[in-house]
């Protein structure tokens, strides 16, 4: 799912977030899913970076999700792949892509990081995206003529 925030930041989030959606309306939060759902965050980020969203190119993208560890290495492998691909999207399209796909042990940790005001990683990611978008705009405006 993609959402656009004030300032032109696109947020691509997974579906775990839907279970604590009230958090997003309060200004923060994160969510995601397992396996393939986490990969969907990367695809969403790529499509938004390439084609824009609602007719506009975003100033930044936030990839938000939660991957819960299981008994195998599967979660770590997914987390590493998502991390690498989100970085590639940012570099390829010249956009700040803020990585907020959390690899956590259990749903209690996810609730804490999504809903607790002291540890709200989604809110931190949104703030970082807005700061980076402003920085990129300022740096691009100071480029010497070619």
Image (cartoon, helix red, strand yellow):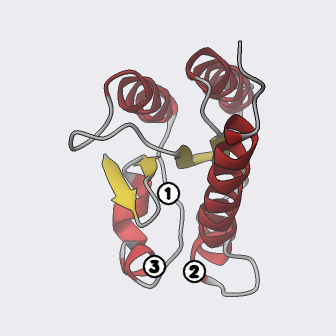
Q: Residues within 10 Å of mark 3 (few under 14, many from 20)?
A: many
Mark toward the start of the polypeptide (3 vs 2): 3
Q: Secondary structure at mark 2?
A: helix
Q: Specify the quadrant of the image occupied by residue 95.
A: top right
Provide residue 33's location: percent of width, then percent of height. 47, 45
Mark toward the start of the polypeptide (1 vs 3): 3
| Count of all numbered marks drawn on residues in the image | 3
Q: Is residue 5 left or right of residue 80?
A: left
Q: Which residue is mark 3?
A: 23
Residue at the location (47% across, 62% down)? 7
Q: Which residue is mark 1?
A: 31
Mark toward the start of the polypeptide (1 vs 2): 1
Q: Residue furthest left?
A: 54
Quick one: 9 or 25, which is closer to the camera?
9
Query: Can residue 102 be seen at all in this image of the molecule?
Result: no
Residue at the location (65% across, 84% down)? 116
Provide residue 53's location: percent of width, then percent of height. 28, 40
Q: Is residue 126 left or right of residue 9?
A: right
Separation of disc 3 and disc 2 at Cα? 6 Å
Split into 4 quadrants, where in the image is the C terminus? Answer: top right
Quick one: 115 or 63, which is closer to the camera?
63
- Give the label on residue 54, or none: none
Question: Are dots 3 and 2 in contact, CB under 8 Å?
Answer: yes
- Give the label on residue 115, or none: 2
- Relative vertical location of residue 18 with respect to residue 14 in this rendering, above or below: below
Question: Are dots 1 and 2 in contact, CB under 8 Å?
Answer: no
């Amino acid at each position: 799912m993609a959402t656009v925030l004030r300032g032109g930041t696109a947020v691509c989030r997974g579906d775990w977030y839907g279970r604590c959606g009230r958090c997003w309306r309060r200004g923060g939060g994160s969510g995601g899913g397992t396996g393939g759902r986490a990969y969907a965050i990367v695809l969403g980020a790529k499509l938004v970076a390439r084609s824009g969203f609602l007719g506009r190119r975003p100033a930044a993208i936030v990839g938000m999700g939660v991957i819960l560890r299981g008994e195998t290495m599967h979660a770590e492998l997914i987390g590493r792949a998502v991390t690498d691909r989100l970085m590639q999207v940012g570099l390829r399209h010249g956009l700040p892509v803020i990585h907020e796909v959390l690899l956590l042990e259990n749903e209690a940790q996810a609730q804490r990081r999504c809903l607790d005001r002291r540890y709200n990683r989604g809110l931190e990611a949104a703030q970082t995206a807005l700061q980076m978008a402003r920085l990129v705009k300022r740096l691009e405006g100071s480029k010497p003529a070619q």
